[in-house]
Image (tube, rainbow, N blue to C red):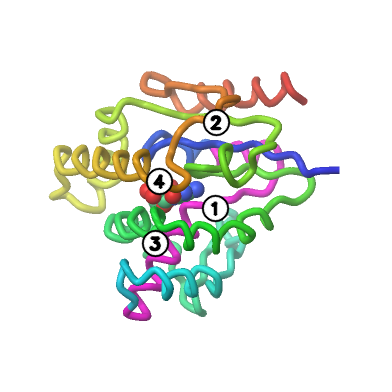
């Protein structure tokens, strides 16, 4: 029998990451943070001096990513190790996110990461977080969620996360970055960000994290 999969897609700042972590914990399921794989490929490219338009070299990097996801001791999420180096925080940097979204537009890179993503599926189930989880990677998932929120609200959320670390952060800059990232993710030719036709769409603009989590759990119970 096929493993149960819940896919959660949506734009940057829609709350996917947080919701997927909570959901996986609540259900006791595996978690795939697919964005991390694109970020890791981007970081590996930087480490190896590979240009972001060198499609062949990027494809090779993606296909051979030497990465480990380790459960961390404090029970808080996972530790990510790339080529022996801890990069858990390094991959969250804005520039790495930008680079990731540039290389994510390349078909051969996406293709190279496809099986690696599907390998995360395991009993009792998988929560898959990304842009094309419901449309491309797990098209027969039992439950597909598409999370959205206004660009302004997503920028606010990002700003609140960032301001303690970067006191000079500008809300305007963040909003512009979010809009640019949306445009790139939604308008690319390969696996663009869009809701699967059978996705349950949730606008989280005025919802709390707990409300979103409960809404997704309700959907999961309906199908269970
Ligand atoms: O979700 P996160 O911000 O970590 O993803 C970084 C970038 O990777 C996204 O902006 C997107 O371009 C790309 N991505 C993707 N497909 C996924 C996950 C992420 O194209 N399934």
- Disc assigned to residue 196: 2
Q: Earlier in the sequence, mark 4 or mark 3?
A: 3
Mark 3 Cβ and ligand 1 under 8 Å apart: yes
Residue 190 position, x and y percent, is 45, 48
The span from disc 2 to disc 3 (Cα, nearest Å) is 27 Å
- Marks 4 and 1, Cα distance to the nearest angstrom? 36 Å
Crowd class of label 1 (few under 14; some 14 to 19; many from 20; radius 10 Å): few
Q: Return the residue at label 1.
A: 76
Q: In the displayed image of the protein, which residue is found farthest to the right? A: 1
The reply to whether the magenta stretch includes residue 185 is no
Q: Which residues are magenta?
A: 20-49
Expressed as whole percent of the image width and height from the top left, the position of residue 162 reads: 27, 47
Looking at the image, can residue 21 be seen?
no
Q: Is residue 39 magenta?
A: yes
Mark 3 or 1, nearer chain start:
1
Seen at 48% across and 22% down, the residue is 202
Q: Tell me the residue that label 4 is attached to.
A: 189
3D distance between C-alphas at marks 4 and 3: 25 Å
């Amino acid at each position: 029998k096929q493993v149960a999969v819940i896919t959660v897609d949506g734009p940057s700042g829609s709350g996917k990451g947080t919701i997927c972590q909570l959901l996986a914990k609540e259900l006791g399921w595996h978690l795939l943070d697919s964005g991390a794989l694109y970020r890791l490929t981007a970081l590996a490219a930087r480490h190896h001096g590979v240009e972001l338009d060198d499609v062949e070299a990027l494809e090779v990097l993606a296909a051979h990513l030497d990465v480990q996801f380790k459960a961390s001791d404090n029970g808080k999420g996972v530790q990510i190790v790339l080529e022996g180096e801890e990069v858990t925080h390094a991959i969250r940097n804005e520039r790495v996110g930008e680079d990731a979204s540039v290389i994510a537009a390349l078909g051969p890179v996406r293709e190279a990461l496809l099986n690696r993503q599907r390998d995360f599926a395991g009993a009792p189930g998988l929560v898959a977080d990304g842009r094309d989880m419901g449309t491309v990677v797990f098209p027969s998932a039992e439950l597909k969620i598409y999370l959205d929120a206004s660009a302004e609200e997503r920028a606010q959320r990002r700003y609140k996360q960032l301001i303690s670390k970067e006191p000079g952060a500008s809300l305007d800059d963040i909003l512009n970055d979010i809009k640019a990232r949306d445009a790139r993710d939604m308008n690319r030719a390969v696996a663009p960000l869009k809701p699967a036709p059978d996705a349950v769409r949730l606008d989280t603009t005025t919802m709390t994290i707990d409300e979103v989590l409960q809404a997704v759990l309700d959907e999961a119970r309906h199908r269970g």
